[in-house]
Image: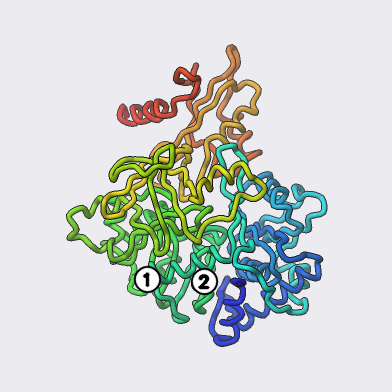
Amino acid sequence: MNIASQLIGVGKRLADAPAITDRGTTVDYGTFAERASRIGGGFRTAGLAPGDRVVLCMENCRAFFEVLYGCWVAGLCAVPTNAKLHPREVQHIVENSQARICVTTAGLAQSLLPVMPEGVRLIVADDADYEKLAAAEAIAVADRRPEDPAWIFYTSGTTGRPKGALLSHRALLFMSHCYYADIDFVEPTDTKLHAAPLSHASGLYALPHVAKGSHHIIMGHFDPGEIFAAIETLPNVTLFGAPTMVSRLVRAAETSRPDTRNLKTLYYGGGPMYVADTRRALELFGPKLYQLFGQGESPMTITGLSKLMHARTDHPRYDELLASTGYPRTGVEVRVVDQDDRDVPFGEVGEVITRSDCMMLEYWRNPEATADTLRGGWLHTGDLGALDESGFLTLRDRSKDMIISGGSNIYPREIEEVLLRNPAVVEASVVGRPHADWGEEVVAFVVAKPGEAVSQSELDALCLEHIARFKRPKHYRFVESLPKNNYGKVLKTELRQRLTEEEKAR
C-alpha cells in the first residue's frame, strides 16, 4: 500500500484534467504524476532509501505537491513543516527527523541556509537544482506496507520541543476514506481551494481530492476578496478555514455580498468557533459548513459536525450542537475518561481518548511520550470534554494549557522557556485570553528579579530570535509574584481570571 499509487492512477485515466493551478499556470494530472515520479527518481539518485525523511518547509506552491508525492513514490517519509516557524525551530525538526534533504521556497531559503545541519542538502523549489531533480529518470511507485511511515507531523509539546507524530500510509488512506464517508463525495469536477498552509489541514485534505482528480487552486495568502472571486468563477469549491478565517470571511461577506452558489464545502476546525459566528456564516453561505476535531496524532479525524446537523435549526438543542465538535467519525471510537482511563458518566468532563486506523504509530524518537499517549491502545488527546447521551462531544478545556490563536497551536511552556532566557526574568507564565478575531491571544505574566527592570521590547526581541512571530506574546503583565498552590504550581486559572476582570473593568 502506497498512497502515491492513487496519483499515478489518476495521471493515467485523467491525464489531461487540470490538476494544480499556481499563479496562473496550470498543470494537468499527467504532468503532475510524471514530475512526482521523476522527483522520486531524483531522490533515489541522491542516495535516499525507502523510509528516509525529507523535510518540506515551503510556502504554498505547486512544488509542495510534487515533492510530497515524489517522496511517496520513492518510499520516503515526508516531513511537511509550517513555513511560519522560526529558522531555529525548523533546524530542530530537520535534526530530530534525521532528514538528509530539506526542500524550501525562494522566500525562505536565505533564512534557512545558515541553520541547516552539516550534511543536509537544501533544495530551493524552481531553481536549477530542483529542476534537475524533476528531470531525473522516472521510477515506479515503491512497494510499501500499510504500517510504513508516510508523514511526520510535528506538533509542539509541553516540554517546549516539538514532537513528531509518525503517520502511516494506512492512516492517511483511512483519513481520505473517512472524508468520503462523512464530508463529501468528490469528483474530477470539484475544486480544492488552498488559502491556508499546505503543511496542515488544507494540504491533508488535498489527499482525498488528488485521489479523485479534483482541480487544486493554490493561493499565496488568505484574502477574502480573492477567495470570493475564485468561488464565483470555479465549480464545486471546497476550502479549509480556521475559525479566525471563517470570521474574516463572514465580515467581508456582510459588506460585499458575494455570490457563493459555487461553494460546496467550507470545513473548519483547529480552535473554538463562536456559535454566533457559525450562525452568521450559515446565513450568508448556506448549509455548507462542516466542523472537524482532530490533531496531528489523528489528523482531521476524531469527531465532526456534519452539514446536515449545521442545517438542523429546528433541533431543540441547536445552539448546543453548534457549540459541540459533533460525533465520532466513521470507523472512529471516542471515549471520555477519568485519570484511571475509566469512562465517566454522560455530561461529565474527562480526557478525550480515541482509537481508529487514523492514529499515529508513535512519536518519532520519543518512546516515553509514545507510551504515555498511546496507553492501552488508545490515543490520549490531552483535551478535556464531555459526551452527551446522543454521542456529541463538547470540548471544555485543554489539559495542557494549549493556546489556539488563528488556528495555530501555541504551547505556553515553549514561550515561557524563551522568556526565562533573559537573566533579569525570574519567573514567567503564559496564558491565552479570548480574542474576537483570533480566538485567543497570548499574554505573558513576568516576574523580574528584585531591583532589576525588564522592558517589553527586550522580551519581544528575545522571542523573535527564538520562536515564530505568531507565538510572541501580544501583551505583557509585569507582576511582583505569580499565584501558586501549596505544591508550588502556578495557578493559571487565577491569571486568566485577572485578565477577565481587567476586561470587565474597561
Q: CA distance from mark 2 to mark 1?
A: 14 Å
What residue is shown at x 44% (from left), y 20% (from top)? 485
Depth check: 490 or 231 in front?
Answer: 490
Q: Which residue is mark 2?
A: 217
Q: Is residue 43 left or right of residue 285?
A: right
What residue is shown at x 40% (from left), y 39% (from top)? 338
Name the quadrant containing residue 240. bottom left
Locate the N terminus by quadrant: bottom right
Looking at the picture, how far across and down is residue 82, in whole percent? 59, 53
Q: Which residue is mark 1?
A: 263
Depth check: 183 or 390 in front?
Answer: 390
Looking at the picture, how far across and down is residue 440, in whole percent? 42, 42
**Helix, strand or loop at disc 2?**
strand
Name the quadrant containing residue 391. bottom left
**Helix, strand or loop at disc 1?**
strand
What residue is shown at x 19% (from left), y 58% (from top)? 315
What residue is shown at x 50% (from left), y 55% (from top)? 298
Looking at the picture, how far across and down is residue 153, in whole percent? 59, 54
Mark 2 Cα-neighbour bin, 10 Å: few <14, some 14–19, many ≥20: many
Looking at the picture, how far across and down is residue 259, in whole percent? 33, 71
Task: Name the kind of residue labelled 1 in the image.
Answer: Leu
Q: Is residue 45 left or right of residue 102?
A: right
